[in-house]
Image: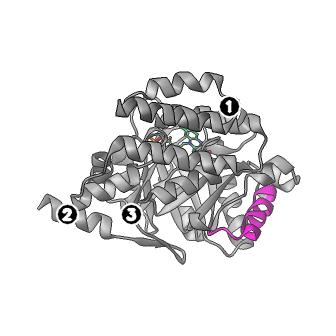
Amino acid sequence: MLQSTRMTVLDKSFHIGGVLIDPPLALAPMAEVTDTYYRSLVKELGGAGLVVSEFISAEGLTRDNTRTKAMLAFDEKERPVAIQIYGGDPDRMDDAAAIVEEQGVDIVDVNMGCPVRKVVSSGAGSALLKDFDRAARVVEKIKKRVKIPVTVKVRKGWESDDVIPLLKRFEDIGVASIAIHGRTRNEAYTGASDWGYIAQAKSELGIPVFGNGDVKTPADAIRMFETTGVDGVMIGRAALHNPFIFRDILALVNGVPTGNEVDRRIDAMHRYLAKIDGAPQVINWKLHKARTVIGWFSKGIAHGKDIRNGLADITSVADVRRLLDAARVRMAA
Ligand SMILES: Cc1cc2nc3c(=O)[nH]c(=O)nc-3n(C[C@H](O)[C@H](O)[C@H](O)COP(=O)(O)O)c2cc1C
């Protein structure tokens, strides 16, 4: 019985505007993480029906900042892909959305969840949840400006859970989908994501809703579908250590094994290294990315600690490959 319930839950692909989301699982936007390299890796590993970029400054985009514009890069294989923008000025956000649309991505997403002081002090991110009129104006101007679907990612409020009236305004304006992280701004990452609130928002809206927050395992994802009725589940932090979580959710639903953990992790690390090695960025960026991401992916596997210890001394991407090979030899011994 449980198995058949699960099958129906994950069989429900849906559309954001004209964009098919199948499977109904999304990689959450994460600053400094979900760039094109990370997104395309997750997409390749399987199971994610949507990948969302790190938040990109509307200010930077509209001032033609070279570094900000470089963040718009994406790979065709990522599709469907959403680019997320942030900013507090309605007159800049629509210009930024138009720049995003020109890139040819599938969806433009508006950040109304970021709790960071520097962001909210400029009226952006979750600060928009304190001023419904300005938030609605931001979205309305963007909606008038672009043809691609406009989505919004919110927290459940600034300091109390009061965002549903705003979400209904978004729906009236023509927003195509909402993602809700079930914490207030003031909670930042403390406490638990309020799945009850996510369920309430879902029940009061007609547009598709992604539930977000505290999905740590494939079983959690199934539970979120079943207990909240959301259309899609969006996963952030769990995908840092386990980029396979999306495919593992499908494996759990379909009752198939997930494969050899060491093999697939080493393979994912090599794939990631190939991506950053081929990137146009400077070597220090490559080394920083390799240390961070290989650090995450090597957790929990035999000899992973040796890999992480070795990351302190790398001077090239080839050095990282050698660390992986050495770990493999030790595993085989
Ligand atoms: C490192 C990091 C960076 C994040 N950056 C963004 C961002 O750029 N835009 C955004 O909307 N949310 C951002 N978030 C929030 C996540 O998208 C997500 O809402 C939150 O982590 C809760 O989901 P989780 O429990 O699955 O991680 C970030 C979270 C983390 C951990």
Local crowd at mark 3 within 10 Å, few (<14), some, or many (≥20)?
many
The answer to whether the residue labelled 3 contacts the one labelled 1, judged by CB atoms less than 8 Å apart, is no
Of circles 3 and 1, which is in front?
3
Q: Earlier in the sequence, mark 3 or mark 1?
A: 1
Query: Which amino acid, by three-letter code, is at mark 1?
Result: Arg
Query: Which amino acid, by three-letter code, is at mark 2?
Result: Thr
Q: Which residue is rendered at x = 50% and y = 36% of the image?
A: 325
Which label number is shown at residue 5? 2
Instruction: Between residue 318 and residue 296, name the one nearer to us.
Output: 318
The picture quadrant for ligand 1 comes to top right
Splitting the image into 4 quarters, where does residue 30 fall?
top right
Q: Give the percent coordinates (x, y) of residue 46.
A: 43, 59
Of circles 3 and 2, which is in front?
2
Q: Earlier in the sequence, mark 3 or mark 2?
A: 2
Residue 192 located within the stretch drawn in magenta: no
Q: Quickly name the residue at label 3.
A: 231
The answer to whether the residue labelled 2 contacts the one labelled 1, judged by CB atoms less than 8 Å apart, is no
Q: Can I make out residue 308 in this image?
A: yes
**In what element is the residue under mark 3?**
loop
Of circles 2 and 1, which is in front?
2
Q: Quickly name the residue at label 1.
A: 117
Query: Which amino acid, by three-letter code, is at mark 3?
Result: Asp
Q: Earlier in the sequence, mark 2 or mark 1?
A: 2
| Magenta region | 91-106
